[in-house]
Amino acid sequence: MDLKRNFEADKLGENELKILKDFTKKCRGDILKMTTIASSGHPGGSMSSIDIYAVLYGFCNIDPKNPFKPERDRIIVSHGHTSPGVYSALGNYGFFDVEDAIISFRTAGYPFEGHIEKTVPGVEWDTGNLGQGLSAACAFALASKLHGYDNHVYCVMGDGEQAKGQIGEARRFAVKYKLNNLTVIVDKNGLQIGGKTVDVMPDNIEENFKADGFHVITINGHDFNEIYAAIKQSHSINSPVAIIANTVMGKGVSFMENQAKFHGATLNIEDCKKALAELGEKDDLDEIIAKKKAGFSIKPLSKRNNNFLVLKDEGKKIVYTREKNTDNRSAFGNALADIANTYKEKNGEQKNLPFAVFDCDLEGSVKTGAFRKAFPDNFFESGIEEHNTAVISGALSTDNILTFFADFGVFGVDETYNQQRLNDINHTNLKVVCTHCGIDVGEDGKTHQCIDYFGLLNSTFGFKVILPADPNQTDRVTRYIAQNEGNFGVIMGRSIIPVILDENGKPFFGENYAFKYGKMDLIRDGKDVAIISTGNMLPHALKGWEMLKKEGISAMLLNVSCPSDIDVQDLKLAAKTGLIVTIEDHNVKTGVGTSIGSMLAENGISVKFRKMGAKFYSSSGKPEDLYKLAGLSPEDLYNFVKKEI
């Protein structure tokens, strides 16, 4: 199609208007075919948004022949259920064969899912549960600033989702960080599943955007001239812009217009034929259905490659001695600052450092202050807005920015589990570092004692959980995750803990220690029992080991820092003792012990096996007192092992 990209023209000409009119008529027909053949989908919102999609995908700086070029514009669709509209627009613009989307929509084993999926060229972020898109759009707008790209980011949203709190968080972030390369377009069709949006939950969309600092433009969302002019105008405004597009649910088919039921109800074959006739579009339903029943294949899609930054130089390892006890979180902060400084030294005084660290008003507690002081332009204080921050940090990590999100466990894992799950679905490269985990949080009490960090993150398919045992291992782990792709959850407590020493009194994780993901650390050898400890429980387990030694009990002490992927050979070594006891600062039902028990059974390893962990929510108090209440003190471990032996 002969359309000028990057909104070069001052306004639309007659030729462009005719192209858009014919294009959207074809797309509306494809939307109906797609959803009717699948007997599933969301035609109403797709038809109210399609005129917006036609202008955006037709005129922004994207290329169907090179859909993943780094400096492209980004279009984030927050109301991902309008996938039929997105697929019809992209397909008809040449990103793929639209007939493939029509025949395979919502079919098992094919990429054209019910909610948009970024394996489809032109789709930038998987969305589905509403309220996520603006956060992702903020991330891509921020990435462009960090990279120095002269491009633009668009976020198309529904009106019903505007009631979600995360959108308010994202609005404020966009204004605070002056994302004037961000334009929001809200499809305001006034309807959702439950009926009129004003009845389901009143929400003054325009005033909310204005109150947070957006420039607001209101248009007719079915007038191509108004859509084009508003988008072009947004490029010259020095603030984030929100375009409120008044639209009609089911636009284009008389008996579908302004009918809330068509949010998620499809037409039957007979009604679809009537709708196609009204649109003046080809009725090939019977032909497509027959082809689908006979078996079909689709053409390969352009493949997206990961655009992840991983470091080649780990920096200078910091070794903490027995005289230099500290907390793991401080060791993390020191390593983080060193990694960034090393990168800067190796790569010169480049203006755009490809690093980002996100904080939610906890800089002093999660120990990111040294990084902020050295690299203020790469430190993003997001305030008490964890949901938005989790998505921004995740999306940013996919755009060649090494991204860390540091938070307390109850906020970075518990509160934002949905967002971390979406990061996992989107195959991000996020480094989540959670401090203040476990009963070790102590005096703050049960609301702040995250004891389900592993159980939650381990229920994703991509997150790798690492629990460093002391400051030295924390230092190595921090450097490791910066050098390796993928999502990591690094978990640590709050307290100052002693440096773990070997039997010669030297740091076990010292100068010559190399962290190997998945391997257990043999802290002490023994033959009567194998005690497997995790994270900040290791110093307590070591005290229990010493008590057992005095009783003449030869205990093997193992540290498992990578419970997501345990080396079976290490388990076999532990099983040779005849008794394995796990101890952890975690819910005993869903923790490392349960994972180890499953592995023992699955691998046919026969051994007596027992678990120690949190069995109830604790209270406020000093960590050592709370461990006693929970039955997790060194004395409890000693007594437990003696009884089992």
Image (cartoon, grey):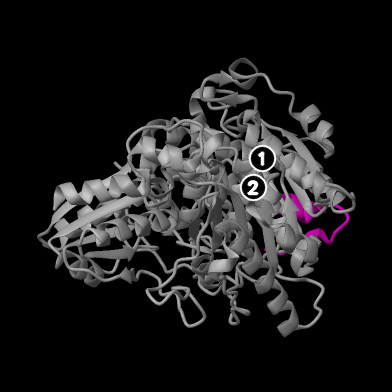
Element under label 2? Answer: helix
Answer left or right for 588 relative to 517. left
Q: Residue at x 74, y 78 (%)?
A: 344
Q: Position of residue 497 (x, y in %)?
A: 51, 57
Element under label 1? Answer: loop
Q: Is residue 193 magenta?
A: no
Q: Residue at x 32, y 71 (%)?
A: 522
The outermost residue toward the top is: 199
Q: Is residue 44 above or below residue 490?
A: above
Q: 599 or 417, which lies in front?
A: 599
The outermost residue toward the front is: 550
Q: 380 or 319, which lies in front?
A: 319
Q: Is residue 181 above or below residue 316?
A: above
Q: Amino acid at mark 1?
A: Glu
Q: Quadrant of residue 36?
A: top left
Q: Quadrant of residue 393?
A: bottom right
Q: Position of residue 29 (x, y in %)?
A: 52, 44
Label 1 Cα neighbours within 10 Å, binned few <14 / some 14-19 / many ≥20: many
Q: Which mark is residue 18?
A: none
Q: 485 or 337, which lies in front?
A: 337
Q: Which residues are magenta?
A: 1-22
Q: Which mark is residue 389?
A: 2
Answer left or right for 463 relative to 124. left
The answer to whether any part of residue 151 appears in the image is no
